[in-house]
Amino acid sequence: MMSFNNQFQNGIVILGAGNVATHLSIALKKAGLEIKCVYSKTIDAAKKLALKVDSHYTNKIEQIPVEADLYIIAVKDEVIEVVIKHLKLKYGVVVHTAGSISIDVFKEKFENYGVFYPLQTFSKDRETDFSVVPICIEANRKKLEDILLELGKRLSNNVRIVDSNKRKKLHLAAVFACNFANHMYSIATEILKDTDLSFDFLKPLIDETAQKAIDSDPGLAQTGPAVRNDQNVIKEHLRMLKDNPEFEKIYSFVSDSIYKLNKKKN
Amino acid sequence: MMSFNNQFQNGIVILGAGNVATHLSIALKKAGLEIKCVYSKTIDAAKKLALKVDSHYTNKIEQIPVEADLYIIAVKDEVIEVVIKHLKLKYGVVVHTAGSISIDVFKEKFENYGVFYPLQTFSKDRETDFSVVPICIEANRKKLEDILLELGKRLSNNVRIVDSNKRKKLHLAAVFACNFANHMYSIATEILKDTDLSFDFLKPLIDETAQKAIDSDPGLAQTGPAVRNDQNVIKEHLRMLKDNPEFEKIYSFVSDSIYKLNKKKN
């Protein structure tokens, strides 16, 4: 127990080759850590990431080296359990990077385990400044928690202990703040499609809206027809959306919710 | 007709003292234009803005000077018609700043009129860099359109002609990209309220989500459980929201919409 090298000198194995796996591996490599092997069931994806971080690669889980110090599972949530089932290791630490999966997913099988959840949206072909990415750490032992905290601090200035329950809430909040906010931008682009107005026109607005929320409280920063309960504008907008019942429903529910939340606050 | 001074040397009257009126007045003043009078039905609001832009002020619409070159109506949408009804002027140009109101609102009463719509979210106590704010211009005469374009260019590098129909669509798109995106941030803060996790934790994510949309296409940049159709996570999130049927509904509709829009695109 706890016999792995706490500087991870026997290397790190990355399981997964998607956005999180890619950006995290690159950040670890930049921080001077060795990526020993990249595993992905898609050999091309494994190879592509392995080339970036100067590592071996495989698409066979039984070929993963068993003597690494750290195994980072950064696959899709729904395959984490399958990967855990087939992963063999001698003494290393195993962590996953998922917002919504409990640390308990490891407890039947491993001795030293934890969670290393970077709270950011990662995209292929877009660089990530890992130093500002909040990293949420959890571990099954206090000493391991400290070791993962130290590792986190080598990548980011924003590392803290967050237990599985809180992490789940954080992930849910992040779905709203990131995926759902982004979908509002997407709907805006759809609305502009049948005009000659480009989405570029909205960019200063998107930027300012985000900066305003970052500088203050988004609940207090709200503007627009819904918070003013300007029914003339709201009705006209709903009329304009009548050919798209999906956007119409979203408009209606979100407007109601803005008005109610604002009333509760004031 | 067209007898006003096209450099607006006889000054500008601002009707309204809210966020748009305030930021626009300050930008005009900075650009070297004279604000002659600020009107607001709330005398304190009129006075407060007048002090900022070195102007007279009144809360009586009949006391507004009749010989100014430009009258900018920046009141709430629902009172624009009332203000128009009572406004008297000799030869000036009158414009409004509303996204959703047609230019035709002026046609019964005035000879020279238009729209001067700054597409941005303005807040009290927050400075605005007007140079990046898109300004949408419309006018009832070509020559006046040119004059308003010139005026816009004194404030911003991003000025263009947008007719009432397109402006309405732009405003609807802006409601999604700004007010609704901001509400997604607000819901995120509400979700974190019963934890000790502060909203600060989400700020790098909000910033990156906005920058990603600005740098590429938000439809292609989507991440998260909805676009992956990860039903395990989605069901768990809906369960977590069951005490707040409003947020639950928004989660469900927006997730569906993300999945459908993505399928349509790919």
Image (cartoon, coloured by chain):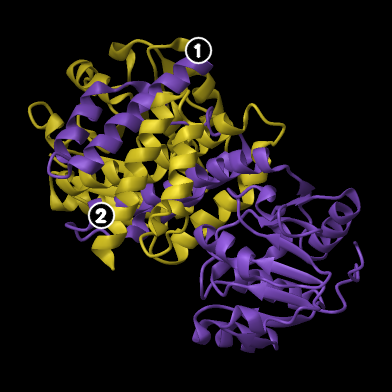
Chain colours: A purple, B yellow
Amino acid beneath label 2: Glu
The quadrant of the picture occupied by the C terminus of chain B is bottom left
Which of the pair B104/A2 is nearer the observer?
Answer: A2
Q: Residue at x 31, y 42 (%)?
A: B117
Residue A26 image offset from top left, x and y in percent: 68, 76
In terms of depth relative to the viewer, which is nearer, B253 or A74? A74
Find disc 1 in the rendering and name its residue.
B44
Which residue is painted at 67% across and 55% down in the image?
A: A117
Numbered label tally: 2
Label 2 lies in what chain? Answer: A
Against A96, residue B245 (above or below) is above
Element under disc 1: helix
Q: CA distance from mark 1 to mark 2?
A: 42 Å
Taking the image as shown, residue B180 lies to the left or right of residue A143, namely left
In the rendered image, is residue A92 in sight?
Answer: yes
Between B20 and A256, the one lying in front of the other is: A256
The answer to whether A76 appears left or right of B39 in the picture is right
Q: Is residue B31 visible?
A: no
How far across and how far down the image is residue A121, in percent?
A: 55, 59
Q: Horizontal placement of A65 versus A216: left or right?
A: right
Label number found at residue A193: none
Looking at the picture, which amino acid does disc 1 mark?
Answer: Asp
Seen from the viewer's position, the closer of residues B127 and B5 is B127
Mark 2, residue position? A190
